[in-house]
Amino acid sequence: MTHDKIEVSGEKETLFGVEGTSFGVSGESDLTADWKGSKVQAQAEFANEKVAIRAKAEYEYDAGIQGGEFSIAGQYKSFHFGVKPTWEASEEENEGGDRTLDWAVLYHQPAYQVQVGGKASAAKLSVGLDWYQRVSDAVAYTLALNTKRNNETGDYCATRGAVAGQWKLDDDTELAGRVTVCRKNEKRAEMRADLALTQSLASYCKATLYADINLLKITSGNSAPGNAHNFAVELSLE
């Protein structure tokens, strides 16, 4: 059985994954006489300690530009921010294509980190908030909230909140937990609790006891929505 790992992390990352300076062009073709279906993709990246930029485009010989992406992320003191507009051509004629805009703002300190961001398109709008707090060398927790709105109906189609914590009991033992509340629509909501106890058995071996509990089935009976409880034992070699 597989299960979702309980993540409690506040490591600062480069927004949108731009890591260095590069430039590349690639193409593909069926080698037909009229070059029909031939494609060319080009991408350029630049990054230093303060700014990261990426531009990418795809051109198809008989259909024109089929998509593009441009992202820019910057840093000012403890603030990190970025935007990434993308465009993909529509398969339907007379359609403007799919346009999306990703954005994020992050504030990073050694003991805590806050990030707000979202994604906007013609069909949906999503907004999220993530908070990481390191209480001590042994204890840390995270809070995550996000919601999605269907722009065509005006309904909020999914809202999710999660609180996760991590407690390092000693050098060999770690306890992690998470409570998640998810409202998928007006008729379906879920509330789950996850617990994971990890024990180092040797320098190369760890064992994890994992439990995934459907809290609604405990409070409302087996008729409550969502999957049943899950339990697992995992042994990993490093």
Image: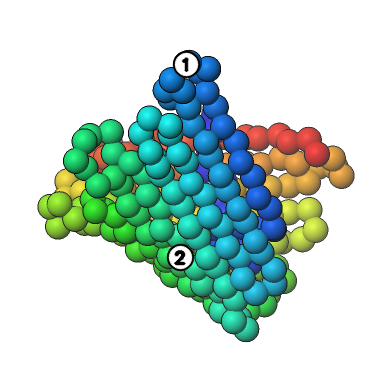
Question: Could you give the CA–CA distance between mark 1 and mark 2, rounded to whole angstroms?
Answer: 41 Å
> Which residue appears at 47% of the width and 16% of the height?
33
Q: Which residue is labeled 1 in the image?
A: 33
Question: In the image, what residue type sits under mark 1?
Answer: Ala
Q: Residues within 10 Å of mark 1 (few under 14, many from 20)?
A: few
Q: Is any part of residue 208 visible from this angle? A: yes
* Residue 36 at x, y percent in the picture: 42, 23
In the rendered view of the protein, which quadrant contains the N terminus?
Answer: top right
Q: Nearer the viewer, residue 201 or 132?
A: 132
Front: mark 1 or 2: 1
> Which residue appears at 48% of the width and 16% of the height?
32
Q: Which residue is labeled 2 in the image?
A: 83
Could you say whether the residue bearing mark 1 is in a helix, strand or loop?
loop
Question: In the image, what residue type sits under mark 2?
Answer: Val
> Which residue appears at 52% of the width and 23% of the height?
29
* Residue 13 at x, y percent in the picture: 62, 63
